[in-house]
Image (spheres, rainbow, N blue to C red):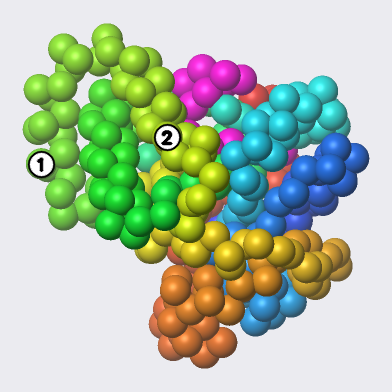
Amino acid sequence: MENKNNIKSLQLICLEILKEIDRVCEKHNILYWLDSGSMLGAVRHNGFIPWDDDLDIKMHRDDYEKFLAVAPQELKKQYFLQTHQTDSEYPLFFAKVRKNNTFIDEKRYRRLKIHKGIYVDIFPVDKLGSNIKVAKKHCRKLRVFYFFYLLLERKVDTNTTDKYYLFFKIIRFFFIPLSFFKERFRKIFEKGLIKYNSTTDSRFIGSVSVLQSGKSIYEKEWFSGFFKHQFEDMEVNIPIGYDEFLKSQYGDYMKLPPKEKQIPEHGLSFSTDVEGEQNE
């Protein structure tokens, strides 16, 4: 199994998956754009951040749902669209496109019988309303609900280095009787994600389908238009408000971090060639 020191081979697989996503989106007129560190990589490096070990994209909710509808038929056979509907033990609220016959080791999900191939994350973006206080309150509420959902999802492990690990294990024990209601919790959370999507005057948008340490509320106008930017050997959309977005996430984003912090964020082991399509 390859390790984090051979990060380039992992990035090449991610880039290959992105090109397949791009092909499907181009065919079906689906808008997507680079997100987070992938957007930063495009702007600062014209490609991957040299030590980055993942690739993230975002879609507005309507495009996201359209992609989920067409991708199972459109993706070439070496790729797999992963959602809770296509992979029943998959616990997250955003999609991944994984490559078959590859493997990536994520400690939190080792006990889950899911496809574990190398992947690209696809995050849906939803409206959060026109009042920043309301948007923040909504995000906090969803994060709390997501936390309780993970307590019920007993096969998802917390990081063993987390200072709250023991607390998490103890409190999870008391939630065992509620595990029966896990799917009901999931449906309530999914309904909460799209609560403000029917509004027409939303000033704020965000992707709160996952617990994020960074800021997850953005000005809608930052994403009112997109343009193509070089990313490795292809061109990919980034928003016209990329500067404001990247500053909100990283501060002085063009400044390289110190050498000791130029390491893969996830520190994952992986293989680019394994037997078995589902890689459970």
What type of secondary structure mainly makes up the magenta span?
loop
Q: Which residue is drawn at 80% across and 72% down?
A: 230
Q: Image check: 157 left or right of 261?
A: left
Does the magenta segment cover residue 94? yes
Badge 1 element: helix
Q: From this view, report whether residue 45 is shown above or below residue 13.
A: below
Does the magenta segment cover residue 266? no
List the residue tagged with mark 2. 195
- Tell me if I can see residue 114 in this picture: yes
The amino acid marked with disc number 2 is Lys
Closer to the camera in the image, 195 or 41? 195
Highlighted range, magenta: 84-101
User: Which image quadrant for residue 30?
Assistant: top right
Q: Position of residue 81 (x, y in %)?
A: 68, 30
Q: Residue at x 26, y 49 (%)?
A: 137
The amino acid marked with disc number 1 is Phe
For the C terminus, give its image quadrant: top right
For marks 1 and 2 on the same chain, the one whose residue lies earlier in the sequence: 1
User: Which image quadrant for residue 200?
Assistant: top right
Q: Position of residue 180 (x, y in %)?
A: 27, 9
List the residue tagged with mark 1. 167
Question: Could you tell me how far apart the alpha carbons at marks 1 and 2 are, in whole angstroms?
Answer: 31 Å
Closer to the camera in the image, 140 or 249? 140
Q: From this view, report whether residue 243 is shown above or below residue 3.
A: below
Badge 2 element: loop
Q: Position of residue 112 (x, y in %)?
A: 44, 26
Q: How many labels does the image show?
A: 2
Q: Are marks 1 and 2 in contact (CB under 8 Å)?
A: no
